[in-house]
Amino acid sequence: MTILSGIRVIDFGQYVAGPAVAMMFADFGAEVIRVDPPGGTMWKSPAAEILNRGKQRICLDLKTRDDLEIAQALVMSADVVIENFRPRVMDRLGLGPDWARELNPSLVYLSMPGFSSTDPELKDVQAWEAVIAAASGQFTDMGLNRVLMGINPSFSPVTLASAYAATLGATGVAAALYARETTGLGDWIEAPIAACLMEGLAYNAMHVEDYPERYKSLRERERDRRAEAGEPMDLSYPECQSFCDPFYRVYRCADGRFFYPVAGSHSTHSPRILRLLGLWDEFKDELGVFDAFLNTEDWPEKPEFTLSNYPCPKHWADRLSARMAEAFQSRTALEWEQIFGNNRAPGAAVRTTHEWLQSKHARESGLIVRLKDNDLDDLRGMGPLAWFHGEDPVDGNRIRQQDEDREAIIADLANRPANSVKANTKNDGERQPALAGVKILDLCNVLAGPQISSTLVRFGADVIALGPIHSTMDPWNTVIYGLQVNQGKRSVLANIKDPAGREILDSLLKKVDIVTYNGPDRQLAELGLDPDRLHEINPDLILCKLDCYGGTRNGPRSHHPGYDDTTQASTGIMSRFGGPETPEEHAHMGTIDVLGGIAGAYGAAIALLQRKRGGAHRFVKTSLAAAGQLLQCPFIYDHKDRAAFSEPSGRRVLGDGPFYRCYQASDGWLFLAFPETQAEALEAIPGLENVASLQADMQTERLSDVIASKPRSAWQGRMATIGGCAIALGSLQELRARYSRDAAEKAMASQTFQFVRHPSHPCGRAVTLVDWAGIRPETLPIQHGTPAPKYGEHTRSILTELGYPAKMIERLIEAEIVSESWSKDYMPT
C-alpha cells in the first residue's frame, strides 16, 4: 500500500503552482486525476509534463454539458480538488468550492488565485508568474549588489511565487486531511500566490527599527555611506565583490571556474576553511574565536573580532580574501568541492543548471530522475520534494499522455459512490486548528530547519525549540532571522551531548509527535537521533530531517554540509541570476531556505496523516537541493534532443522577451505581460502599428518608446481591455508601509499582502514582520504566532513540566547542562 493510498486528488491546475501541488501528492502515492482542457496543457513544455508524472489524464471541455457532468462527478468522488484560476472562475463553470463542499462536505478544496479573492484592487488581475513577482516587489531593489550597482529594476525568471505557493498549499491540504481524520469535515483553503511569495521574501521584507550597526554587512555599510555622502550607486561587479565577506565570496580556481565558500557565521567553519586553504598558521595568532553573543563593548581587545561573527571588518576582509583568492588558484573548483565536503566545510563549485542536471551527484542521489515519455528520449527531471527514508517513488515513472485514461476514468465513475468519508456530528461546534494537539520538538538552527516547525505553528502545533547552551552560529543568523522563524515557539537550552542533557532530550522525545532536525544523516547517531533509538523511546515519533544535498538515495555529496547559498551555486541559480561569468546569490535572503523548510513541513504533515491512517513510516526527509530544483521548475529538465539552455540570465535582464518585460512609463516602472500569439491586438494602440511583424529587438524598442509616453494607470486599463496585463512594480518597503497592522489588531481578512508590527517587541526594538497570510482556510482557524522569545526563556518552565524540581534545575544551570540565555541582551549590540 502506498503512503496516500485511497486519497483521490483532482487537478484542474495550470502552469506551475496547481500542477506542482498535485505532483507532490502523486509522488506520495495519491490517486491523482489530471483534467486538461481541449488541446492539452496551456503551458507547452517538457517541464509541464514532468509536473504531470504519476497522474491519470483526461481532457474535458468544461463548456459542454457532458464533460462538465464528468468533471462534477470527479469532484464528488474526490478527497482533494486543486485549481489555480482567477477568483470565481470555477464558480462560473459550476465547479466552485461552495457548490462542491455542500455536496461533498469531506472535500478539501484548494484555490490558488494570483491575488486574494477579496482584494479590492488586485483580485481581477491576470496573475501570470512575473506579474505576481512584479506586484510583490521581487524585481525592485533586488539585493545589495543591484542597489550598489544602481540597477533597478531587474528581472529574475526563477519561479519563486509558484514554488512557495505550491509547497504552502500542499502543506495546508495535508494538514486539513489530518484534521478530517477526526472530524470527517473538509475545508476550502485559499492560498493567494502573491501572499505565499511574500512569506518567501520575509527576510527581505522584515524591518527592525534602530537596527544595530554590528549586524550591517560591508555592502550595507557602503550603501549607507554612499547615500549619506550623496555619491552615486555605480559599483562594478568586482567592486561589489570587494564588499563581500571573505567567507561569503566567489573565488576563481585553477581551471577558471568559480567556487563559493559559505561559512562566515559559524564558530568552526571559518577556521576549518583557513586550515584547508593552508592559511591558518598565517593568521591564527591574530584571529580568534570567542563568544559572538557578547555585546561588542565586552569583546576582548585582542583579537579584535571573532571568526564566528558576521560581518568581518573591511580591513580584515580585504586581507583574508586576497590570500584566499591566491590559495583557491592552486586547485580546480571541483577538487575544492570534494576537499571541502570531505572535511565538513561548506562550499560549492558554481554550476549552470544544465551542469547540475548532468552531474553525478544529482543523478545518483535521486534528486534528478529518469522519466518515461512517449515523445522524449531519456527525459530527466526533478525528483520528489519530500520522501520517506528508504522510499524511491518517482524514478522510472511513465508520464501518461493527454486523455489517455478517459475511458477508464469514466468507467470507474459509473461504479464509484460519492466520497464515503462521513462527518463526525460530535464535532459540529467551533473547529480547532488543523494540528491542534500536535507537539513538535525543534532541534534545528538558523533558518531552513526552524522554518519546518514555524510553518506548522500556524496550524495549531505546539513547538518547543531545543538549542545548545552555546550557539555555534552568530546572532545575525540566530537572533535576527529568529524574529520571524521562531514566532509562536518556546525555547529551552541544554547540552544534549552530556548524559544529563541527553535525559532531558529523551524526556521531551517521549512527549512529542514530531522531532525536526537539519543536518546530514551521519550526525543523527552522534546526537541520539538515529531512527532505531527514537523508535525505542517513542514508537509513534516522526523524525523530519532536512539537509543540503540529500535525495532518495546516497550520492557523492549526500553528507556534505551546506547552506542556501551553496545550493544556489550547485544547482544553477547563481549562474542564472548573476550570469555565468559574474555569478551572484539570488537577491532574496532565504531564497531556498524558506522553501526547504516549508517542504519539510509538508513532509511532516504527510507523516502525521499516514500515521493517523495506520501507516508505519516515521522518517521523512527533504533537502535544500530538492527545493532549489522546484524553484527552477521551468528549467529543470533534460532529454537527448534538448536545445541549448537560453533562458534570461544576468543583472541587466528586464524580462523574457518584448511581451513579458519591465518597461518604464512616464511615472515609473511597470511590468507588461501580453500573449505573444495575440500581438496583433497591440497594433490598435497609436505608435504600435505593425509591431507584431517586427524583430524582437525592434518590438522592445517600439514598446519602450510608446509605454514611456503615458502613466502606468493608463496602461493598466488599456492592456486589460485587450487581453494583456500591465501592473506597477511594487517594492517591499512600500508594501510593508501600506499593509502593516499593529500586533494588537486583528489580522486583515481581505488584503493580499499582510504585515504585522510589534511596537514593543521583546527584543527591545519595534519590529515589522511578514504576517502568516499564505494559507487561508474557510473554517479551520489559523493561529498567529506570539513574538519570538529570547533563546532559553522557557528553560525553567519546560524542565518544571518534565518534573524537574527547582533545586535540580539550579544544579543543572550551575553545571552548565542547561542555560537560560545565550546573551545578556536579547539582541546583542
Image (spheres, grey):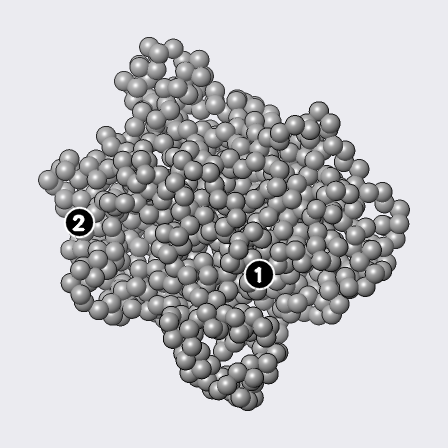
Task: Identify which residue, 560 or 460, lies in the foreground.
Answer: 460
On the image, the x and y values in percent for residue 823 come to 26, 31
Q: Disc 1 marks which amino acid?
A: Asp
The crowd level at tag 1 (other Cα within 10 Å; few <14, some 14-19, many 20+) is some
On the image, the x and y values in percent for residue 744 come to 40, 35
On the image, the x and y values in percent for residue 500 come to 39, 19
The answer to whether 3 is drawn above or below residue 794 in the figure is below
Quadrant of the rendering where the N terminus is positioned: top right
Q: Mark 2 points at which residue?
A: 283
On the image, the x and y values in percent for residue 323 come to 21, 59
Task: Identify which residue, 77 or 611, lies in the foreground.
Answer: 77
Q: Are marks 1 and 2 in contact (CB under 8 Å)?
A: no
Task: Identify which residue, 17 or 372, lies in the foreground.
Answer: 17
Q: Name the residue under label 1.
A: 124
Residue at 53 percent of width and 74 percent of height: 718
Circle 1: element type: loop
Residue 188 left/right relative to 274 = right
Quadrant of the rendering where the C terminus is positioned: top left
Residue 766 left/right relative to 457 = left
Residue at 35 percent of width and 62 percent of height: 141
Residue at 31 percent of width and 60 percent of height: 144
The answer to whether 252 is drawn above or below residue 807 in the figure is below
Q: Furthest-left residue in view?
A: 301
| The quadrant where residue 734 appears | bottom left
Task: Identify which residue, 55 or 619, lies in the foreground.
Answer: 55
Number of numbered tags placed on the structure image: 2
Q: Mark 1 to mark 2: distance in Å?
A: 60 Å
Q: Disc 2 marks which amino acid?
A: Phe
Residue at 32 percent of width and 28 percent of height: 469
> Does the rendering let one see residue 175?
yes
The crowd level at tag 2 (other Cα within 10 Å; few <14, some 14-19, many 20+) is few
Q: Say whether disc 1 or disc 2 marks the residue closer to the N-terminus.
A: 1
